[in-house]
Amino acid sequence: MDFKEQLKKYQEIVNIELDKYLTKQECPEKVLNQAIEYSLISTAKRLRPILILQSYKIFREDYEECLPFAVAMEMVHTFSLIHDDLPGIDNDDYRRGRLTNHKKYNEATAILAGDSLLNHAYMIIANEVAQANNCEEAKRKMQVLNEFADAINKMIIGEYLDTECQGTQISKDELDNIHNNKTGAFFIYCVRAGAILAGASEEEINKLTIYGEKIGLAFQVKDDILSATGDAKIMGKPVGRDEEMNKATYVTKFGVDKSRELLENITNEAVEALNDYKEKAEFLRELAIYIKERNK
C-alpha cells in the first residue's frame, strides 16, 4: 500500500472513531451538538491522530489500544481551531472551504462547542486511565494524560504570544518559541503518546520527539508560505490574511524563498531523525515530505 492509500485508510479509521462520540439524538442542546459535529466531522487531514497511531505501530501492531487517544487529540485540535477563528483572535470567516463555526452558528455557540470538545477529550483519556488492566499500563496512560495537558497549555501560550506579537518585530528565537508552542507542542505530544502507549524506551521516545519537533516546525513554516502564496480555492480560505493582520510569520521575517529553504532543511532533519527505525518508519518519512509538499 502506497503512502496516499495508507493516509486515506488512517483518515477513514479516525473518522469512524470520531463519529462514535457524537451525540445525535433530540435534546435541548441539539444545536450545540450540531456545531460540534460541523467542525469535528470535516475534510481535515487528521495528521495529529495519525501520528499517534503510526508512532505506536513502530513498536506494536495492535494500534486499537491508542485509538481513543487519537480521537481525543483530534477533538482538542478542533477545539483550538474553533477558538482560533473567533473574532477576538484571528476573526476568520472561512476554514476548509466552509464558514467558520461562529459564522455558521454564533460566537457563543462556537465558544461552547470548543469548550465541549476540550472537556470530552479529557473525559476520554481519563476513562482510558481508569480502565487500565494493570499498574504498568495505568502508569503509561497517566504519563500520556500529563503530557496531553502540558501540550494543550503550550498551545494556549503559543496562541497568546502569537496574538500579542502582531505588528511587532521579533527575533527568530521568539518566532520559533511561538510556533514550537502553538503548533509544535501537539506534533511532539502525538509521536510521544504513541510511543509511550506502546511501551517504548525513553531513548526511543526521545528520538521520536526530535522528529515531532521538526515536523511541527515544518508544518508551521509551510502554513506561512501557503498563507502568502497559496491558492484560496484549494485552501478553502483567503490568502494574505497573515500580512493583513501584521502577524509574525516565517514569511514576514525571512521572505518566501528563505522560508522555502528553511522548510527543506527542517524536513530533511525530520527524516534523518528516523534513521534508526528503518522500514518501520517509512510512513513517517513520507508524512514529513507530504507536509512539505502539501498545497492546503
Image: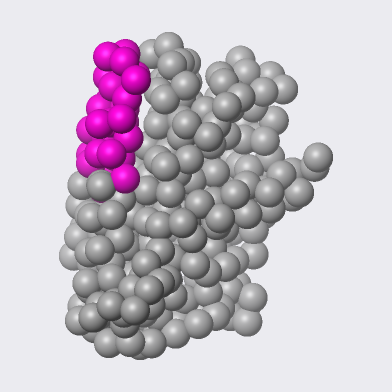
The reply to whether the magenta stretch includes residue 241 is no
Provide the major secondary structure of the magenta segment. Answer: helix
User: Residue at the spot x=61%, y=15% of the render?
Assistant: 276
| Residue 91 on image: x %, y % | 31, 81
Q: Which quadrant would the N terminus be assigned to in this image? A: top right
* Quadrant housing residue 31: bottom left
| Residue 145 on image: x %, y % | 27, 34
Magenta range: 124-152
Left or right: residue 161 versus residue 3 is: left
Vertical order, 278 against 213 (above or below): above
* Residue 175 showing in the rendered view: no
User: Residue at the spot x=62%, y=35% of the render?
Assistant: 284
* Residue 157 showing in the rendered view: yes
User: Residue at the spot x=25%, y=39% of the render?
Assistant: 126
| Residue 68 on image: x %, y % | 42, 42
Vertical order, 293 against 256 (above or below): above
